[in-house]
Image (spheres, rainbow, N blue to C red):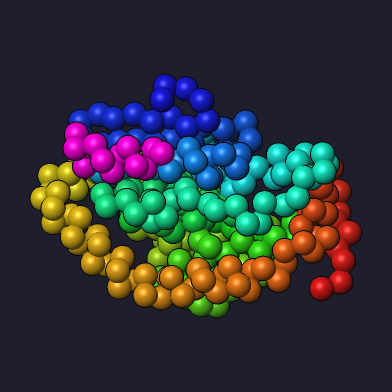
Amino acid sequence: MADGDILYEKEEGIAVITLNRPHRMNALPMSIWTTELSEIWRDFDNDPSVRVGVLTAVGDKAFCTGVDVKEAAERNKQGGRPQASVEIKASPWQNNVRKPVICAVNGIVGGGGLMLVADSDVTIAGPNAAFFNPGVGVGIVALVGQIAWVNTMPFHANMRMALMGPHERIDAQRAYELGLVTEVVRDMPLLDRAKEIAASMSRNSPAALRVAKKLLWTVKEHHLMDGQAQHSVIGAEMRGHPDQQEGPRAFAEKRKPNWQAP
């Protein structure tokens, strides 16, 4: 793919997947969350010419701010229902990607963007990276990415992110201290550093890389699968609540939301 909402390039054994909606803070329409990224991950994982993937985004303002809330508000305005039951299959983990994936984060990350970061294997960040989960601020409970961090990030810091919503952001240095990223890149372009790490990984045994990744993720998944199942069950308590439509509508109209009682 040479243009469009996602750029997909392969060079010297490395695949680079780039989110390309800087005009919308790299918020992604639902088709990308459900179909397009899944197709790219499948191609990457099955192509013997590439060994390591890099996931990044265009611009330095935002890596990914999740689902395009303005698109959701427009859909609601036209009488559509919130797509709470739609299957999201956008991250490397959700697509059972066997090869290593490095996530290179520039700018802010929110909502579903957290899932893309948490479900990658190694994350590095530029100094302007910032992490937050705006969900509760627009009447949505979307904690898939944060569930993946339950055994990575200190519990109370994770809980604080979930409950503060859009009102507080974790900067790059704090994210490093909490274990959300493995490196803050300050002295060279972020993508260059990601490719440098990918090139080092690609010199290792492809079979050993896959087994090492599978082993560590298998151990983590014993907890992660239970957490994701509970997310579906408990998260369903919000399904159909008026706040799910009021939140995106208020965001699009740039006004304070009129929340209903729980």
Q: Is residue 176 visible?
A: yes
- What's the magenta region? 39-51
20 or 192: which is nearer to us? 20
163 or 10: which is nearer to us? 10
Q: Is residue 73 left or right of residue 57?
A: right
Q: Main secondary structure of the magenta part?
A: helix
Q: Position of residue 75 (x, y in %)?
A: 75, 41
Q: Is residue 173 visible?
A: no
Residue plotted at (26% across, 41% down):
46
User: Would you identify the image quadrant in which residue 258 lies?
Assistant: bottom right
Residue plotted at (29% across, 30% down):
10
User: Would you identify the image quadrant in which residue 224 lies?
Assistant: bottom left
Q: Position of residue 33 (x, y in %)?
A: 53, 45
Residue plotted at (65% across, 42% down):
68
Q: Is residue 17 left or right of residue 64?
A: left
Q: Is 145 one of the magenta-colored residues?
A: no
141 or 199: which is nearer to us? 141
Residue plotted at (27% across, 67% down):
216
Q: Is 40 one of the magenta-colored residues?
A: yes
